[in-house]
Amino acid sequence: MQNSFDDLETALLGAARAGGPPAALPEAEPTLADAYGIQRRIFARAGMPIMAWKLGLTGAGVREAFGASEPTVGRLPASAIYSNGSEIAFSGTKMFAEAELIFEMGRDLPVQDAPYTRDDVSSALKGVYAGIEIVRTRFVTSELTLPLLIADNSMAHGLVLGRKLAAQWDDRFADMPATLTRGTDEVVEGGTARVMGNPLDALVWQANWLRANEGCSLQREQLIASGTCTGATEIFAGDTIRVGFDGLEAACVDLRASN
């Protein structure tokens, strides 16, 4: 079984590289614990620190569809963080974009046995941003089971850091309208309340997941993409993706064809 997982790790690592072939679905499916182990080891092999944590399945409906009892987690290095208005390359066979609230940590959370609270995490912030998450699978298909989704880094690919909305948490972010537009297509409407009912609760969940599963805490300057406010919209080379919060354009990225 371990040899099978070694092969899966190697295939996913190769598929993550530009121009790498997509990974075939494995014959033996990992458990959830195995899947996070695969994700962790693949990231460690890249030799870069974690700059951003990504939350997936933060909506009750999509969790039910996957048979998941909680959100999923992915991790990104600094090289996968893009500034507002950037141009990024299309990669893989399919890519999707999501409007997200992104949190920036202003200090390390202390490692502790007791669960973190809203006050604990909100007092440690130094920024709340609009953002665009770019997701893609490294497998031959994006129709994945829950363990394979997790092994695939929860499909995390890149994060566009948009306009800074505030230095600290404000309760208006709990239920704020959000939009995503691909080129001249019809606007996809959503809102921050789609993220676990309140994106701050997603941040608290992330902090406690790390405490329980990774033995670490959120660190100063790390970003946390709290979950999609608009669902996943398929995007294509040549698209311009725009995200708005509360009626104002707040993030933008251009997608170019890969070289």
Image (cartoon, rainbow, N blue to C red):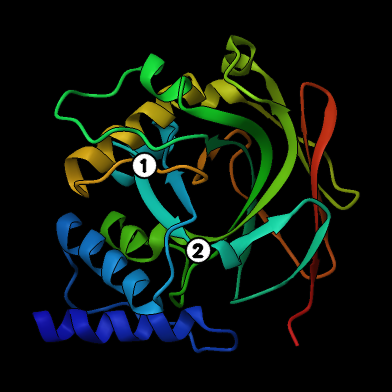
4 up-or-down from 191: above or below: below
Say which element carries label 2.
loop
Quadrant of res 129: top right
Q: Give the amino acid at mark 1.
A: Ala
Residue 219: mark: none
Q: Amino acid at mark 2?
A: Pro
Residue 226 lies, in percent from the top left, at 50, 37
Residue 11 image position (x, y, % from top left): 36, 85
Q: Is residue 114 left or right of residue 144?
A: left
Which residue corresponds to the image point at 17% horizontal and 23% vertical from the top-left?
A: 114
Question: 191 left or right of 219?
Answer: right
Viewer-nearest of discs 2 and 1: 2
Residue 73, given in percent of the width and then of the height, sits at 37, 49
Q: Is residue 68 visible?
A: no
- Position of residue 41 measured from the top left corner of the image (x, y, whole percent): 27, 71
Quarter in which the N terminus is drawn: bottom left
Which image quarter: residue 205? top left
Q: Quadrant of the C terminus?
A: bottom right
Q: Are marks 2 and 1 in contact (CB under 8 Å)?
A: no
**Helix, strand or loop at mark 1:** helix
The residue drawn where x is 37% and y is 20% is: 120
Q: Is residue 127 left or right of residue 33?
A: right
Q: Nearer the viewer, residue 65 or 13?
A: 13
Q: Is residue 231 positioned above or below 40 on the image?
A: above
The image shows residue 218, relative to residue 45, as above or below, that is above
Q: Is residue 117 above or below residue 202?
A: above
Picture disc at residue 77: 2
Pick out the residue farthest to the top: 171
Q: Which residue is mark 1?
A: 65
